Structure formats: structure tokens, C-alpha cells
Image (tube, rainbow, N blue to C red):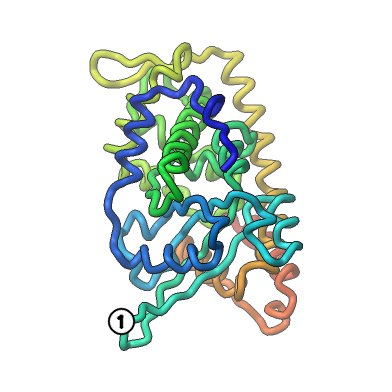
């Protein structure tokens, strides 16, 4: 692994990194590790780390869901025998794939299912710290689990990247607060609302509030530990709430940046959807299932559109945008 540690640790509070390490190390069901072993076989020596996030992490079990993983690799050229996949991943990270595994001891032919996104260590570092669009730092400011790390150096590197994601998330979203005195819940509802709006995501309007409440204790501790990196933006009050220190010009610039992120997110979402049609097996059925699961809206998948996944993606995205299901 390329050593970026000398610059990557700057300005990140040690308490925040320690909190991230504790959060990321919490135990999970052994079922998730079955899928991790499959990823280790898939990528071999190119695999540096595997992160679990998303709805199955929040429910603490696989059940009938599709698990969300990030597979972090040392380089795209080493990760793929197919050169074109490496080019696609470098052009617009991540590539997204589908994984299905049957546990060996299972006699009922039950399958564990996952989708996994592939990103290089370099892109993961940049995406949690420097990317303008919140695609990575919004996801990994939220709780995740580090289920595999090649060695202790990689483990520490991932913890620092996750800590950077929290700081980037807070620094980017705080100027969008509508009140000057807020609690941790309001801070994270605001941030999650802004980041969800920056992607074409089939989520209900109340999703940000639900997520903030589910993980409120974690978000409260993360905010407290991130405070040294938020000097001049946020001040902790004696009652445990916070005073937002941003001024009118800060908020004006923030509104412009988030408008640009929403425009950028629309373009990137369409491009990633198009790319997934070539990397994600049966991506249309999965997309239709996820839209219905998150919004209650059933999307028809006709045989003609199944044969033309890119056309299906554009058609459905346009329909959902018009109906307000995606924002």
C-alpha cells in the first residue's frame, strides 16, 4: 500500500479517530463474514480492506436483504483481470458488482446476497477528504464496520479516512443549518438531508430524520470528538447543545456549493447507473426492487427494457424525478 499517512492524519482529532476505531470494530453476525471470505477470494492480493455499511448493518442481520460492502483495493489494474473494468473504475469510481454465496453448512439452499463497490485506497482517501461531491464522505461519515484489513497499517489508514469523512461532512453541511443553536440530532438531520438531495436516491423525505435517530448516540459522540476540527464553525454550550458560528457569507457560499453538488450529483448518478448496467448482473431487477422497498413505488421491468438497461435507467429516472420520488 502506498504510504499516505504522513499527510493524511493532519488536523484530525485523535479522540475522533479513537471513537471511529471503537465504532468500526463492533461485532457483527458471522453471516457477513461468509461474504467477506468470498470477496477475499475474488480479489486476492489486491484487496486491502472491506467495509460494511447500509441497511443490513443497521438491522444487524442479512435476512432476505442485499448487504452493502465497499471493497478497497491497492490498485485497479491489480484488482481486475479485465482491463476495461479497471479503466471504468478509474474513470468514475466506484464499480458496483453483485455477489451471491451459499453457506457450505446450509442444507436449505439459502443464499446470502451482497452488492459491493470497488474503490482504490487512493480514491477512498480522496473521496472521504477532498471530493467536492459527497458520494463517499457522506456514506462513511455514517456508521460502518471494518470487517477486514490486510494489516494494522491499513486498519489505521481506514480509521483516519473515516474520521476525515466525519469532519468533511460536518464542515460542509454546518453552514446550511437554519438555526444558530442546535443539538447533535439537528446537525446530522441537516447534513443527511443535504447529502441525500445531492444524489438521485429513492428515499422518503423522512429518511434523514430516521437515520439520525437510529444512530443518535453514535452521532452525538462523533460530533463531540470532531469539535477540535470545527473551530470557528461550532461551539459547544454548557447544556450539550451547539452554537453555529457561521455568518451570512458562509451560508451564501454553502448554498451555492450545495446547488452545484445537486447538479453534479444528477449527472454522476446517471453515469453510474449507466455504468452499473455493464458491471452489475441483473442490475435492473435490483434497482426496481430497491425503489419499491424504499418508496413503495413499483417500477415495471418489461422484456424490451431488460434487453436495453441503459434505456430503462434513463426512462425510470425521468419518471421518478417527475413524480418527486427522486430529488
Looking at this view, is 244 or 223 the one in front?
223
The answer to whether residue 159 is left or right of residue 71 is left
User: Does the rendering let one see residue 327?
Assistant: no
Find residue 228 and report its horizontal and vertical position in percent: 40, 17
Q: Position of residue 235 (x, y in %)?
A: 38, 14
| 278 displayed left or right of 119 | right
Q: Which of 166 and 174 is in front in this view?
A: 166
Residue sitting at 36 percent across and 78 percent down? Answer: 103
Query: Residue 45 appears at what percent x and percent y?
Result: 55, 58
Considering only vertical position in the picture, is 141 above or below 170?
Answer: below
Locate the N terminus and report the quarter of the image it occupies.
top right
Q: Residues within 10 Å of mark 1 (few under 14, many from 20)?
A: few
| Residue 216: quadrant of the picture | top left
* Image coords of residue 55 (percent x, y): 40, 57
Residue at position x 65%, y 41% in the image = 262
Identify whether 242 is placed above or below 105.
Answer: above
**Residue at coordinates 45% horizontally, 19% vertically from top-left?**
229
In the image, residue 206 sits, relative to residue 177, either above or below, namely: below
Residue at the outermost left position: 239
- Residue holding disc 1: 105
Residue 318's place in the image compared with 168, above or below, is below
Q: On the picture, is 102 further left or further right than 108?
A: right
Is residue 143 visible in the rendered image? The answer is: yes
Q: Is mark 1 on a helix, strand or loop?
A: loop
Amino acid at each position: 500500500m502506498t504510504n499516505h499517512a504522513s499527510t493524511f492524519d493532519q488536523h484530525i482529532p485523535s479522540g475522533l479517530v479513537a471513537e471511529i476505531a471503537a465504532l468500526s470494530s463492533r461485532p457483527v453476525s458471522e453471516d457477513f463474514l461468509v461474504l467477506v471470505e468470498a470477496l477475499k477470494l475474488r480479489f486476492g492480493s489486491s484487496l486491502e480492506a472491506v467495509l460494511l455499511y447500509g441497511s443490513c448493518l443497521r438491522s444487524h442481520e442479512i435476512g432476505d436483504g442485499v448487504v452493502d460492502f465497499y471493497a478497497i483495493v491497492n490498485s485497479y489494474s491489480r484488482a481486475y483481470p479485465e482491463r476495461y473494468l479497471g479503466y471504468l473504475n478509474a474513470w468514475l469510481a466506484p464499480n458496483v458488482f453483485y455477489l451471491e454465496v451459499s453457506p457450505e453448512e446450509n442444507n436449505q439452499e439459502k443464499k446470502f446476497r451482497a452488492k459491493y463497490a470497488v474503490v482504490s485506497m487512493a480514491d477512498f482517501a480522496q473521496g472521504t477528504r477532498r471530493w467536492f461531491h459527497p458520494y463517499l464522505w457522506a456514506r462513511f461519515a455514517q456508521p460502518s464496520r471494518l470487517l477486514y484489513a490486510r494489516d494494522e497499517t491499513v486498519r489505521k489508514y481506514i480509521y483516519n479516512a473515516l474520521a476525515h469523512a466525519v469532519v468533511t461532512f460536518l464542515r460542509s453541511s454546518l453552514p446550511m443549518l437554519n438555526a444558530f443553536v442546535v443539538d447533535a440530532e439537528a446537525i446530522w438531520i441537516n447534513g443527511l438531508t443535504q447529502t441525500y438531495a445531492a444524489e438521485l436516491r429513492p428515499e422518503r423525505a423522512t429518511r434523514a430524520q430516521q437515520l439520525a435517530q437510529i444512530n443518535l448516540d453514535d452521532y452525538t459522540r462523533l460530533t463531540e470528538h470532531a469539535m477540535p476540527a470545527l473551530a470557528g464553525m461550532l461551539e459547544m454550550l454548557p447544556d450539550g447543545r451547539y452554537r453555529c458560528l457561521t455568518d451570512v457569507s458562509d451560508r451564501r457560499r454553502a448554498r451555492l456549493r450545495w446547488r452545484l453538488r445537486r447538479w453534479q450529483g444528477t449527472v454522476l448518478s446517471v453515469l453510474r447507473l449507466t455504468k452499473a448496467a455493464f458491471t452489475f448482473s441483473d442490475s435492473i431487477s435490483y434497482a426496481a426492487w430497491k425503489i419499491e422497498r424504499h418508496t413503495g413505488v413499483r417500477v415495471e421491468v418489461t422484456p424490451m427494457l431488460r434487453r436495453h438497461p441503459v434505456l430503462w435507467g434513463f426512462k425510470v429516472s425521468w419518471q421518478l424525478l417527475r413524480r418527486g420520488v427522486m430529488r
